[in-house]
Image (spheres, rainbow, N blue to C red):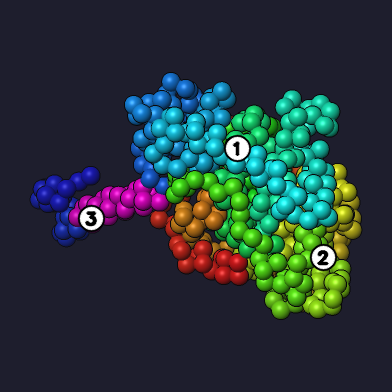
Amino acid sequence: MATASGASDLSGSGAPPPGVGAQAAAAAEEEEREVVRVRVKVGRTLSKVQQVLSWSYGEDVKPFKPPLSDAEFHTYLNHEGQLSRPEELRLRIYHGGVEPSLRKVVWRYLLNVYPDGLTGRERMDYMKRKSREYEQLKSEWAQRANPEDLEFIRSTVLKDVLRTDRAHPYYAGPEDGPHLRALHDLLTTYAVTHPQVSYCQGMSDLASPILAVMDHEGHAFVCFCGIMKRLAANFHPDGRAMATKFAHLKLLLRHADPDFYQYLQEAGADDLFFCYRWLLLELKREFAFDDALRMLEVTWSSLPPDPPEHEVELVGPPSQVADAGFGGHRGWPVRQRHMLRPAGGGGSTFEDAVDHLATASQGPGGGGRLLRQASLDGLQQLRDNMGSRRDPLVQLPHPAALISSKSLSEPLLNSPDPLLSSFSHPDSPSSSSPPSTQEASPTGDMAVGSPLMQEVGSPKDPGKSLPPVPPMGLPPPQEFGRGNPFMLFLCLAILLEHRDHIMRNGLDYNELAMHFDRLVRKHHLGRVLRRARALFADYLQSEVWDSEEGAEATAAS
């Protein structure tokens, strides 16, 4: 860079025309000021990163490291066995994962099972005591749930357990094998002791890797309670958590690749409902089992430590349904509360669409009308009913139907594996039909000729293209993805891995859903992690954080 004095010396040579030297000096001074501004900006950004995640990036993207070994793990403990550098441990795992033999030890830290400051002996005593507490809770099923509710919970859990990771050696074998029985009992105990959440389809996928790694039912239950402290909201019937994650993933894709986002808009796939399973289960099913273990530990390590103040709570609060008289039906059985929700009042488009799917039911004693929640198979019909009456990017609804796994309805339970398949149009023409010939009118009160329909590119007008997508900011890490931003970047990495194939072949929504269904447990972990880490590092070190964008995107959630 030329200094101001250097520029003055050059201007005295007589070669440049009069006035050029002063201009050069001014330009050099401005360049120096810009360097200072960049340095200040980088310092401010790194300060933000350290405040949010307690991380400091020495370079943009750190290379892969070997998995954390037992010997290296002990360097993060002091002489009494207390974890002395939790943030550094997480950053180390983020860049390399954990050796399989060490996972049952390290995962308890990543899942925030241990209170701060426990010595090695205290950790052993703590886990023994919590395991005894679990066994006591397990013996109290009959005291905590009436016979009909308990039978409903157990049968529902069993149906899911019998189709969860059965190809893996740990869960292979007869249906009454010890590991399947342990998974069933763990999930049933959680449902009985956490009546506000109970059991929802998909929880077996979250518990399965934990049990396989811990190989101890009591320890696995304690860890499952730790992860559900963060993920229980995914299964809440109001759908707010999932709606926020959908909104943020849309924001991220729009920010990272406006052209791809615009393509999805024109294909009618910008709602990203084909990513539902990804967000609900934090991508657990998208990789082979052993790769999923590595992906999960890397994702958990990207989160700041959040140890319990005293200890992990193994019992949740009592059901608000029974306390508040849910829909005027105080004390309704769990099996009915799972499948029913209060009707009316919300007035949202999504709620209106659910009404077209729902089955009206009159409960005992009369009172408010109740509607069956939509099953996963009905979510695509719901998607059609919604049409384009609102921009889901900035106003994604928060329906009970988004968490349609909560319904545990018979159509859901009788399907081979509802979460395994994305939502495809049940009555659409075959994929061989040209997109322009497909019927696009939703079944709600939205007409084909509606201006709102045309705004998002109606298939009735295939020649009409959308205007370019303007750049948008992203929420800060503590808000992004409801506090798990790296998960969104993993989803983005998967989408971008297949972006060229999707656009080159002009895939529509159905074809997109089928494409990703075929890739269940087949994604390449190395490529996805490498791309996600690079994108995440760029985000952390950039100035794209904008709480107002996040607030706008999740205003309805």
Residue matched to label 3: 33
What are the residue bounds of the magenta stretch?
27-52
- Looking at the image, residue 434 sits to the left or right of residue 48; the answer is right
Which structural element holds mark 2? strand
Cα–Cα span, label 2 and label 1: 38 Å
Q: Is residue 329 in view?
A: yes
Which structural element holds mark 3? helix
| Amino acid type for the residue under numbered disc 1 | Arg
> Is tag 2's residue or tag 3's residue first in the polypeptide sequence?
3
Q: Is residue 300 in view?
A: no
In the picture, the disc for residue 372 is: 2
- Looking at the image, residue 77 sits to the left or right of residue 444; the answer is left
Q: Position of residue 97 (x, y in %)?
A: 52, 31
User: CB atoms at circles 2 and 1 under 8 Å apart?
Assistant: no
Q: Main secondary structure of the magenta part?
A: helix
- 181 and 393: which one is in front? 181
| Amino acid type for the residue under numbered disc 3 | Arg
Residue matched to label 1: 132
At horizontal 48% and vertical 26% (from top left) the residue drawn is: 68
The picture quadrant where one finds residue 443 is bottom right
Q: Position of residue 481 (x, y in %)?
A: 55, 54
